[in-house]
Amino acid sequence: MKVKTTLLPKRIKNKLQTLGVLIVLLMGSFIFNSFLSKDLQQVQQASLIGGLKTSKGLSAFPIKIPEIKFGFALDTFHVTIDTIRNNQFLAELLLPHKVEYQKIDQLARNVQDTFAVTKLRANKEYTILTRDTAEGADYFIYEPDVYSYVVYDLKDKLDATVIYRPMETTIKEAAGTINSSLWVTMQSNGFPIDLIDKMEGVLQWSLDFYHIQNGDQFKLIYEERSIDGKYAGIGKVLGAYFKNYDNEYYGIYYENGKLKGYYDEEGRPMKSPFLKSPVKYGSRISSSFNPRRFHPVLKRVRPHYGTDYAAARGTPIVAVANGVVTRAGYGKGNGNFVKIKHDKTYATQYLHMSKFGKGIRSGVQVKQGQTIGYVGSTGLATGPHVCYRFWKNGRQVNHLRLKLPNPEPMPEKEKPTYFPIRDKVVAELGAIPFPEPLPIATEMNEEKKGATE
């Protein structure tokens, strides 16, 4: 059976084909725009609630936020992170990353005054960034501490840039009641341990920290520093309060022109020419000044013209005042010791050191608070401690009973400016509540018990 077909003229046929294509395109555009409009609405709605939700169309594509560190987009580099090992030099770190030895040598010369490669230390982390592994590393980054990092350019510049991280400062408060020791109380209440050192720095001239007792109380207002949200140390203590027995001590930070330091309620400077002791927290008096003490090593009565501070081996020993070292050496009974002349009237001596501080020798000048040695048990000693001796007019005396010179007072004209600041800080300290005392076991280790000469 034959089917009869009617053929349209070619001109009309071409027009119909063109019209069909246009209809298809229009329909496709309408459908696409409908989906697009719907997706855009979903994107807008998602952004309003804080993020993109997975949906069909455009929002199905993930938005990747690049990881930025050290000022670089790490996603654009091949990243190597490792730790410097003992006796490992820069060349050993960079040669495997196709950095030529000549470049490493030139880099070391160029950065002498910026951050010398000899300052690189074992056990510190480093990062190597490489754009093209076929052409060698671009940057070597070293972090000497939490406060800064060093970027070594390994390409054309061959130099180094030290970059300091932005630091945030937050004002914080602390309070506690002693029921074991200051160190343990701080630790049990979750306060940074270096806050003890700061508090002692404020009150060390007026308060004898070796005679604090259970029930004593303290309050502090201080600056806490952080970098990228991580703890980075304590700044200034703005106000300190300590109640010891029935005595109350205040230390208020005040800065105005040439005046800068801590003052009490009456405007008297807290700083004194002499510190109360040669060692800081973590120590205790294990033997006092006693002209008729029974010697624990010699087993006979022998005068003890010093005060023994038992502390962990290696604890820093500091000069109690400015002066000149008249002797730094070894004695059979004294072990390693340092003697300092402070003026025509006063001199001090520090015995049984494990080693001397850096640069400590006869004839050198030392500053108050400078480390002159470290606690040990050299000479006649039963355990690690420092025997601290004090001379006045050539005669050894008990420094705990000695009335020492007072510091220069605050000028009278300065007090009207100081007193409003004092009142504000004292009121803020008074508003800080004391936490409930926690039951704590003593922290004293066996090494620190009974140490004496």
Image (cartoon, helix red, strand yellow):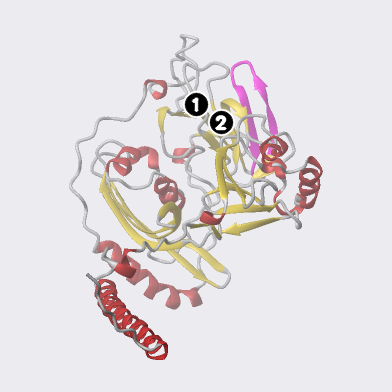
Q: Which residue is mark 2?
A: 374
Q: Is there CB contact under 8 Å for labels 1 and 2?
A: yes
Q: Nearer the viewer, residue 94 or 239?
A: 94
Residue at image mark 1: 313
Asked if 345 appears above or below 17 in the picture, the reply is above
Ranked by sequence position, the earlier of labels 1 and 2 is 1
* Dominant SS type (magenta): strand
**Which residue lies at the image location 62% right of the left edge and 52% below the top edge?**
131
Residue at the far front: name it: 1
Mark 2 surroundings within 10 Å by alpha-carbon count, few (fewer than 14), some (14 through 19), many (20 or more): many
User: Magenta part of the protein: which range?
Assistant: 325-343
For this view, does 89 lie left or right of residue 441? right
Q: Is residue 341 magenta?
A: yes
- Tell me which amino acid carries mark 1: Arg
Residue 12 at what x, y percent from top left? 37, 90
Question: Horizontal and vertical percent for residue 339?
Answer: 64, 33
Residue 96: in magenta span: no
Q: Is residue 323 above or below residue 147?
A: above
Q: Residue furthest left?
A: 436
Q: Is residue 82 visible?
A: yes
Judge whether 268 appears above or below 451 on screen: below
Image quarter hosting the N terminus: bottom left
Q: Nearer the viewer, residue 247 or 392?
A: 247
Residue 51 visible? The answer is no
- Identify the amino acid type marked 2: Tyr
92 left or right of 13 in image: right
Q: Which picture quadrant has residue 320?
A: top right
